[in-house]
Amino acid sequence: AAAGPETTALILSDHGFGSVRPRQYTFQRLLQGDYVAPKGTMGASGMGDQIMKMAVNTYTRFPFLREWAKGLRPGNREKVKKTLRRAGALPNAASIDYQRSKVVPANFGLRMWVNEQGRFAHGMVEAAEKEALVTELSAFLLADRDPVNGQPIIKNTYRGKDLYQGPYAHLGPDLIIEYANFFRPGQPVEKKNPHLEGGHTLEGIFLAHGPDVRPGTVDGAGLIDLAPTVLYLLDQPLPPDMDGRVLVAAIDPAFLAENPPQPGAEPAQWPEVSGGNGYSADQDEEIREQLRQLGYID
């Protein structure tokens, strides 16, 4: 309403939200499958393995502990985390023994790299064994079933080579995990599942409204399609090196016929950025504190 009837408005979320397993779940499974080894504590690596596995198992098997931790004030929650890290009972990048781990996880285990010889300083997996390990790990995770509803916990696994393109694709992860979303809009919950929590999902939302928008549904829209669609609606040519596509399913057919997308001759240009991020020291610290409370950084 504020933009006026002649303005086309687009809304595209960068992710969805649903009921998924907690972020520590994949790390727990990597520990259980001996794909990841924690650093030794209390003078014995075997004891460190047991402490870490017991802590993660307890945290995931008893959901009330997770809810209790979430309810703590940020300062108290951070104190608990630091205590657990010092004891070797909380999984994080610093607690992994990379000389004994077959897999290097990131993003709470949602992305994984094979700890390959020649690729990492402490690589332990030979290059010839890499593909078999990724296949084995994928099957190991996809076999998991939720004890309450019997459905797969992991919806899908993806090979990095199938998702990433370009000159730096080889730096990407070898395996990417997608959790199953158990949330069903409009359907009653038959049985409460204490193993689930709210989390990010791949399926987000796309909304469009304006004089040249076609009513209906659009399937498969992605973030990468937003820029080409905006350029098209602004009657601008599409750079030849731009990824994504114009979401023609959202455009009125008559308007589309009269105004087909025009390929441009000039590649997309990124202006040079200098002088930092534009934030003051106080603003920068405020952003960092928000990220800490959300759990994105330590």
Image (cartoon, rainbow, N blue to C red):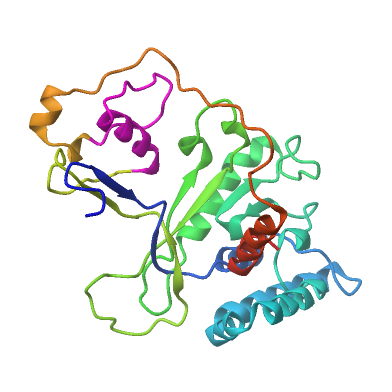
Residue 199 drawn at (x, y percent): 46, 66
Relative height, residue 46 to residue 164 (above, below) = below
Q: In screen coordinates, is 297 left or right of 19? A: right
Give residue 84's quadrant in the image. Answer: bottom right
Give residue 17's quadrant in the image. Answer: bottom left
Query: Is residue 245 shown in magenta?
Result: yes
Residue 121 drawn at (x, y percent): 80, 41
Q: Residue furthest right?
A: 43
Q: Residue at x 76, y 43 (%)?
A: 123
Relative height, residue 169 to residue 75 (above, below) = above
Magenta stretch: give its range: 222-247
Relative height, residue 117 to residue 106 (above, below) = above
Q: Indicate the quadrant containing the C terminus: top left, top right, bottom left or bottom right.
A: bottom right
Q: Residue at x 71, y 75 (%)?
A: 78
Q: Nearer the viewer, residue 236 or 46?
A: 236
Q: Residue at x 62, y 84 (%)?
A: 72
